Image (cartoon, helix red, strand yellow):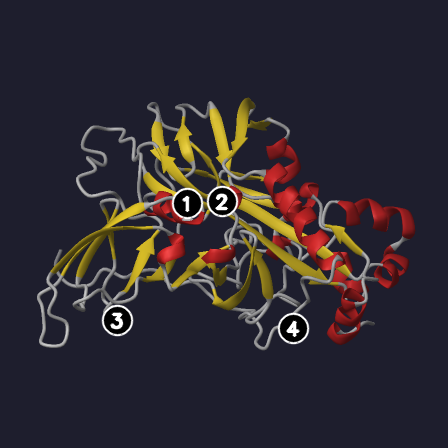
Amino acid sequence: MKTYDEINAKIEAGKAVVLTAEEIIDYVDEKGLERAAADVDVVTTATFGPMCSSGCFLNFGHSTPKMRISEAWIDDVAVFCGVAAVDVYVGATQLRDNDPANMRYPGEFSFGGGHVMENLVAGKTMQLFGLSYGTDDYPRREIRTWFSMADLNQATMVNPRNCYQNYNAAINCSDRPIHTYLGRLEPRMRNLTYCSAGQLSPLLNDPCYDVIGVGTSVWLAGARGHVYAEGTQHYSDCDRGENGVPKEGSGTLALTGDMKAMHPDFVRGVSLIGYGVSLALGVGVPIPVLNADVLRRATVRDADIFAPVIDYSVDYPQKTGNVLTHRSYAELKSGTVRIDGKEVATSALSSYPKALEICHLLADEIRRGDFLITPPFQKLPPRQGFKSLQIRGES
């Protein structure tokens, strides 16, 4: 048994033993679970991929004369102004004004909120255009100016839903190609796409939320961030395997962090043909090895994590609940899977190499004493269901 204080004391002394979620698997195989739990202090986990439910609050400071911004655009992307005078919220999936969207199907969606966030972190200069109805204390009615991250007082990423614990693998059983948030799906099950780092993914290494909770420190695109709440659509009362690992979409995390400290390699705008825009984000979460049970769960392998394969031509959009089959991440990552006697090509929207890079970067920060482990002050809900929107009254 170890405590958070004991692990942090070793980190501060530069004596902590830190392994990535990939390295720990072989280490436990070689040393055994009990010996490894005594030797290793922290296991680093990570993921990198599109996380649509992301965004950021920006504060511009006051112009002269002052202005209470009621409508605003950054590089022609509308931002939310229903907060204080010069605060705005940029949503990752917001389209640029006058984007034709899917009027000329499939739409290209070349620029949106996720790209604004990428450009901010990259230090690029962007245009702010704002309007106001004018008040006695905020008389200015219009502003157009250029700014970069350095001009902002605060730029705080606030993401309602990140780090899905498990997720669908998408396939298309229809006779025509379709475009989804999991990419283009060819007709008659010619390809399959998925989005997870599998055995590196944070909540798959802590399937019952023993150490990851509200208050947990995370590595958010290179900045120190933390879990501020359960993520939206957190669904812990889900179908699980004998190892406790969910077999469907399940737990999520709500994350926040200082964008001024983020690295542009891990904040990237995404254009999804025929669907929209998003943000690809890198997240790392340290798992403190408090005991052998925590470590056992943090040695989960791709072969032991199963994703539901769902038809996105009918079953997903019509919410039938039908699952064609389950396939392990080891199978998905092999490049082909066999479904109904047919070889199906597989590909990922997430990046395993990028997630592994984050695992190593976080491990290095912990070894240097730059990243301490924070115990959660509140557990994630362990048995939470998932409600659907009920359509009531006349359509």
Question: For mark 1, what is the residue?
Answer: 118
At mark 2, the secondary structure is helix
Q: Amino acid at mark 2?
A: Pro
Say if 125 sits above or below 341 in the image: below
Q: Residues within 10 Å of mark 3 (few under 14, many from 20)?
A: few
Location of residue 8 by image quarter: bottom right
Nearer to me, 125 or 73 = 125
In which quadrant of the rendered image does the N terminus lie? Answer: bottom right
- 1 and 2 marks in contact (CB < 8 Å): yes
Question: For mark 3, what is the residue?
Answer: 84
At mark 4, the secondary structure is loop
Which residue is pictured at 63% across the width and 37% down the height?
Answer: 353
Question: For mark 4, what is the residue?
Answer: 375
In space, the residues marked 1 and 3 are separated at their CA atoms by 24 Å
Nearer to me, 155 or 46 = 155
At mark 3, the secondary structure is loop
In space, the residues marked 4 and 3 are separated at their CA atoms by 33 Å
- Mark 2 or 4, closer to the camera: 2
- 3 and 2 marks in contact (CB < 8 Å): no
Sequence order check: which comes first, mark 3 or mark 2? 3
In space, the residues marked 1 and 2 are separated at their CA atoms by 7 Å
